[in-house]
Amino acid sequence: MSGLRRVALARRVEEPGPLPRGVAADLERAKEAAGQRAVTLVRPGMHLALGTGSTADHALRALAVRFPGGVLDCVASSRATEELARSRGIAVRPLRDDDRFDLMIDGADEVAPSLDLTKGAGGALLREKLLAGLSRERVIVVDPTKIVDRLGSRMPVPVEVVPFARGVLAHRFETDGYRVARRLTADGAPYVTDNGNEILDLRPARPIDDPAAVAAALSAPTGVVATGLFVGLADRVLVGHPDGSVDERRRSAGAPR
């Protein structure tokens, strides 16, 4: 199965039901506006980390238009993004031992006022988190529906786990008060990440007040590979709107990185 198909299946499991046609078109215009604004931050010769997801895809398309000559050095966070980049004429290479990136452009499933994020609907949370930690600046592109007062309000928290531990971890998280769903593809098979792991989608009993504490607690059990709580891993968020305008939110000065 291609990477693009795998991400589409993951989204089908994760996201709310289909939107009315007019609303869906408005959101696509909003995503496009955010993606295009993000690309204005890119300069020739930059080392770029490429995120995964529908809004990040818009940024990738804008990147291909702005830099048709392939003058960028890019690493992708998923096979799906790698395939899309190459289909648009953007060269993508493997991650190197000493890599550091000038800029990462990525999407998010939820954005809190602190700019902490919920990510992972596209299944690439581990690689996205790794690349974010290697990037000097992390720019997140979203549409207005992704802005929430508290994480866990709209979307579940994905947790990538090794398959051997999945059942044990699901039981533990249920005991801790989460509603736990094993992520499946559209045909009912277990969803498998690019890393060969599975994903548990956790619905908290109430929205999350302290993302850092929850992220630490979810990461603690043996068998957890990564969580979809991204704390301190966004420097600015670009919120696109259907009319083409873009709001910019920045992490407050002195906030921990």
Image: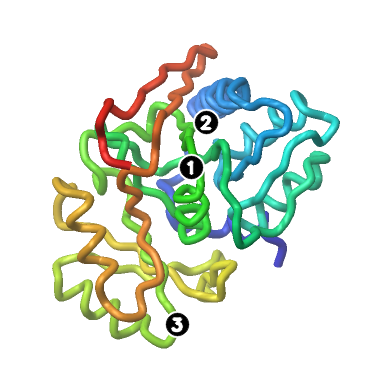
User: Which label sits in the foreground, 3 or 1?
Assistant: 3
Specify the quadrant of the image occupied by residue 5: bottom right
- Seen from the viewer's position, the closer of residues 32 and 128 is 128
Q: Residue at x 28, y 26 (%)?
A: 253
Q: Residue at x 56, y 26 (%)?
A: 38
Res 18 label: 1
Q: Is residue 192 above or below residue 66?
A: below
Q: Secondary structure at mark 2?
A: helix
The residues bearing labels 3 and 1 have C-alpha atoms spaced at a distance of 30 Å
The percent coordinates of residue 27 (x first, y second) are 50, 28
User: Which label sits in the foreground, 3 or 2?
Assistant: 3
Q: Amino acid at mark 1?
A: Pro
Specify the quadrant of the image occupied by residue 87: top right
The percent coordinates of residue 190 (x first, y second) are 50, 75
- Seen from the viewer's position, the closer of residues 114 and 27 is 114
The percent coordinates of residue 75 (x first, y second) are 66, 50
Q: Seen in the image, is 168 located left or right of residue 136? A: left
Label 1 Cα neighbours within 10 Å, binned few <14 / some 14-19 / many ≥20: few
Q: Amino acid at mark 2?
A: Ala
- Seen from the viewer's position, the closer of residues 74 and 109 is 74
Q: Seen in the image, is 233 located left or right of residue 196? A: left
The residues bearing labels 1 and 2 have C-alpha atoms spaced at a distance of 8 Å
Q: Seen in the image, is 44 located left or right of residue 13? A: right
Res 201 label: none
Label 3 Cα neighbours within 10 Å, binned few <14 / some 14-19 / many ≥20: some
Res 24 label: 2
- Seen from the viewer's position, the closer of residues 172 and 16 is 172
Which residue position holds label 3?
Answer: 163
